[in-house]
Amino acid sequence: MTTLRCISPIDGSVFAERAALTPDQARAVVDHARRAQAEWAARPLTERISLVMAGVAAVGAMNDEVVPELARMMGRPVRYGGEFGGFEERASHMAAIAETALAPIEVGEDATFKRYIKRVPHGVVFVVAPWNYPYMTAINTVAPALIAGNTVILKHATQTLLVGERMARAFHEAGVPGHVFRNIFLDHATTSQLIAENSFDFINFTGSVGGGVEMERAAAGTFTGVSTELGGKDPGYVMDDADLDAAVETLIDGAMFNSGQCCCGIERIYVHESLFDDFLARAITIVNGYRLGNPLDPATTIGPMANRRFADEVRAQISEAVADGATPHIDSFPQDDGGTYLTPQILTNVTHDMRVMRDESFGPVVGIMPVSGDDAAIALMNDSEFGLTASLWSRDVARAERVGDRIETGTVFLNRADYLDPGLCWTGCKNTGRGGGLSVIGYHNLTRPKSFHLKKVTS
């Protein structure tokens, strides 16, 4: 039997542990979910929406427990209040658009034929959720999948071991049947085995590129749809006409919030050369004002990284860059322990030959480079294996649209960053993965089209 353990980044202690299911136990869960799916899909859409939103509200009622629990599991400071605002916003939007998004597409009807395309649920949807925003990333798929008539099996990252368990309990207490939404604990080998056995009808995975490769490899030959959101190296570009105060504040927050552990966090910034010195000075002031410490302390503004190995990777990228000529601008904080507590860092004199400007950092470090104009910035933004979001800063919307059209990315922001709008498709390109969540497109990905071509008997 495999035991999964959540090691708290606060002090390295074991915060929680759960036994992973055996393959046979996991197959039984899938079988129950499959048998429950038809009855769930047959319920009126309004009923499914009502039950899902009751589950969302039940999660919100747990927020006073959830916030310190998240701090202990993955290090986010309690002062930020957890994830329920975004969790509820995303679920509410998907509930509000469900009737329209899932409505049949009417192709035409006359005296002879009736033709339309229905959206029908895949069946059993397997959601593999990450630890960095464990509630919000999970609800992106859980809510619309259930609303669309699928049953859902959720597997959470070991670092946030208790999140799926808490979500399932809330939904069950709200009236969602137990076999319709299940949380399970699995090791990697059993996960891959179930996928290879064609246990699921659709898979949504958010995590590392390596994890996405394993998901697709396991699913090879099963024809199971696999939607992935993987790595990122999201750029910010500050144009010569930008609102500098807003750009500095938002981009640095986007780089450092949650200790840099954000899917669409800012990992590299390109600033027009006329604004570079001023941008850098303001950025240094902001970061030097952070308070690194125990996330359970309300005064802490930046907590530990979720795991020692994540912090080690960020330190390695910084050290390599400095050895190759990069300039660090933040002196080591007293609370930096060489482990999970890591000083946030700003680097200049960086190049794209350095890993810190190429590889995903997923930590509190950002490289900043001056650029001469749009063409230079676009070339640098596109010089990446990833493509999730890009953040542009300008007073000229038309200019931003022109630049945005040339960037290889899933989302283009203007004068904001690090935000997921549930009305827009959450998607990426290149090694960031494929697929799309939320919005009308999210429903299309969680269902399949079924065409009806009905010839009427006219005599």
Image (tube, rainbow, N blue to C red):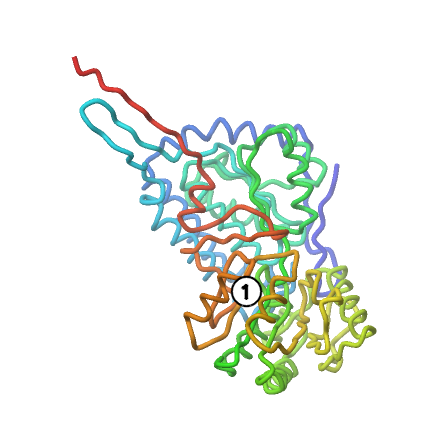
Q: What amino acid is found at the position of numbered circle 1 in the picture?
A: Ala
Question: Where is the N terminus found, in terms of image quarters?
Answer: top right
Compared to residue 233, the image places residue 111 above or below, namely above
Q: Quadrant of residue 187?
A: top right
Q: Nearer the viewer, residue 231 or 2?
A: 231
Residue 82 is left or right of residue 147, and the answer is right
Question: Where is the C terminus found, in terms of image quarters?
Answer: top left
What residue would you read off at disc 1?
390
Q: What SS does tag 1 mark?
A: strand
**Horizontal and vertical percent for residue 310?**
73, 61
Compared to residue 421, the image places residue 456 above or below, namely above
Q: Residue at x 74, y 77 (%)?
A: 335
- Name of the residue lying farthest toward the front: 375
Q: Quadrant of residue 193?
A: top right
**Horizontal and vertical percent for residue 43?**
35, 33
**Horizontal and vertical percent for residue 327?**
75, 80
Q: Residues within 10 Å of mark 1 (few under 14, many from 20)?
A: many
Q: Nearer the viewer, residue 25 or 96?
A: 96
**Horizontal and vertical percent for residue 393?**
50, 74
